[in-house]
Amino acid sequence: MQYRIAMNFLHDIIVPLKVDITKFPNLKIKGIKTDSNKVTKGDIFVAIKGNKCDGHDYISQAVKSGACAIITDSQNFETMHSHQIKVENSRIALSSIAANFYNNPSKKLQVIGITGTNGKTSTAFLITSILKEAGIKVAQIGTLGIITDKKITEKGLTTPDPITLHKTFSNLEKSGFTHVVMEVSSHALDQHRVANIDFDLAIFTNLTQDHLDYHKSMHSYYLAKSRLFKSLDKKAISIINNSSEYTEKLKKASNCKVITFSKTKNSDFYFDNNLSITLNGINGQILFKNTRYKIRSKLVGDFNCENILASVSAAHMLEIKKEAIELGIQNCHVIPGRMESFDLSSGAKAIIDYAHTPDAYQKVLESINKTVFGLNNIYVVFGAGGDRDKLKRPQMAQISEKFATHTFIVPDNPRKENPKTITSDIIAGFSCNNYSLFENRQKGLEKALSLARRNDLIVILGKGRENYQKIGNLKIQHSDLKVIQNFQ
């Protein structure tokens, strides 16, 4: 994809900020930056107050590098630039001016936003598959990067920053893309990264415990998610999982038409009574009024039924033809790092999944327990991320103990937290000593794989297809997938 540099004038860009534009010369703006190290002559520098760093501390550096205007929300900040623009919230300002700088490209695209604790990536892949079957040029933005024509062009946050987002939308639109399917994280919503995106459809998958290190409470976590639905235009559509305890709240929060889905009949979209879920896939029919969709999916797990329902609901509301919807579901064979299954030379099987919350653990292991018969042993390999929600650690141990023959506790992105502290939090959830501890993720995984024999199953949770470990300030190469491949 060829990126083009947008050129705009200051007055045009800052209109949404509700400031007196006549106080500032109408300068030609080259770009927008939040990192003072990347500022060049002709840029606007937006000072963002983060969790670890405050952009206001780097304004002088940005000015020396050629910033032609400064946006700040600090009331106590002493003027260091004649073109200083004070706003109430610089994050909201950033989102507004980024959209204006790139000429509000999301308004020229059909944008489908997906939010929820679990299921965002799987639902995004399913919808993208359907749209491709319909002959639509669609891009996907999420945990695995910005995906266009089967290429990952950029990796980073689940939901990128406003500058990256609007620049991406602009270039997608100029390259002939008409639809974007994107995952919307609670952090992005709380930090106003998507505040100026014109969503046509918004999907809610579920809401369970996660990110409480950031949001502090489930109520705050819900409020962040609800921002997506509160921001929708009246012409947009909310698609909501009817099985959540937050369903009714989100219905009321939505300013537009609401469509519901669940496996039960009290929703707009639901599976009939002949639903079949096995290790070979999901088969059944989804009903919506007088329409029936025949579902033949190779995806496994009871939870994927809801992801399929969300995807079919979205595609139907986008007026995609029935044949394309059914083929799109059928041809989405695997979602990278989500319940991926591998046959081992020992006759055992290994499954990797990105699950990193108690709810995801319960759903993955319960689905395996229901659909896989004749297993001798189930070995579970997992850890917990450092500097993140500590309350979920013992809960994940409790769930693993419930389903596993034996559990292998390994590191999982300890970051700057002491790995021994993380391990201690995890093992507090075990009621017996049916687990092993490893200080090295690869060695723990190799031990589990080496023990496995025919009709055994190794379930590796937490990292999916990630190819690194975050230890301290370092990003060390590691891939669960590559370790598994040595045992095939």
Image (cartoon, rainbow, N blue to C red):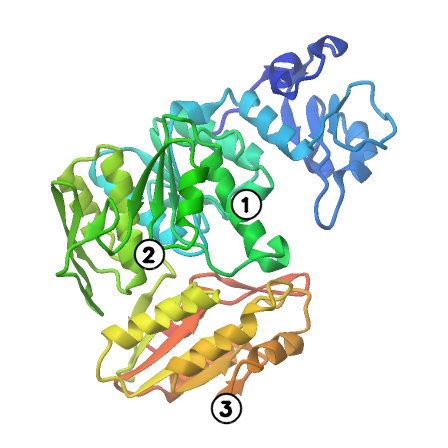
Q: How crowded is mark 1: few (under 14 residues within 10 Å), some or many (20 or more)?
A: some
Whether the residues at callouts 3 and 1 have beta carbons within 8 Å, the answer is: no
State which tag comes first along the sequence, 2 or 1: 1
Q: How many labels does the image show?
A: 3
Q: Is residue 456 above or below residue 295?
A: below
Vertically, is 202 above or below 236? Answer: below
Residue 141 in view of the camera: no
Could you say where residue 448 lies in the image, as x and y percent from the top left?
42, 83
Q: Label 2 vs label 3: CA separation?
A: 35 Å
- Crowding at mark 3 (Cα within 10 Å: few <14, some 14-19, many 20+): few
User: Which comes before the other along the chain, label 2 or label 3?
Assistant: 2
Q: Which element is circle 1 on?
A: helix
Q: Mark 3 points at which residue?
A: 432
Residue placed most toward the observer, 140 or 321: 321
Q: Position of residue 116 (x, y in %)?
A: 44, 51
Give me the disc on residue 224: 1
Find residue 88 and report its horizontal and vertical position in percent: 71, 29
Helix, strand or loop at mark 2: loop
Foreground disc of the pair 2, 1: 1
- Whichever of callouts 3 and 1 sits on the residue coming sooner in the sequence is 1
Based on the displayed image, in which of its 4 quarters is residue 272 positioned?
bottom left
Q: Mark 2 points at which residue?
A: 335
Question: Which part of the image, by quadrant, shows the C terminus?
Answer: bottom left
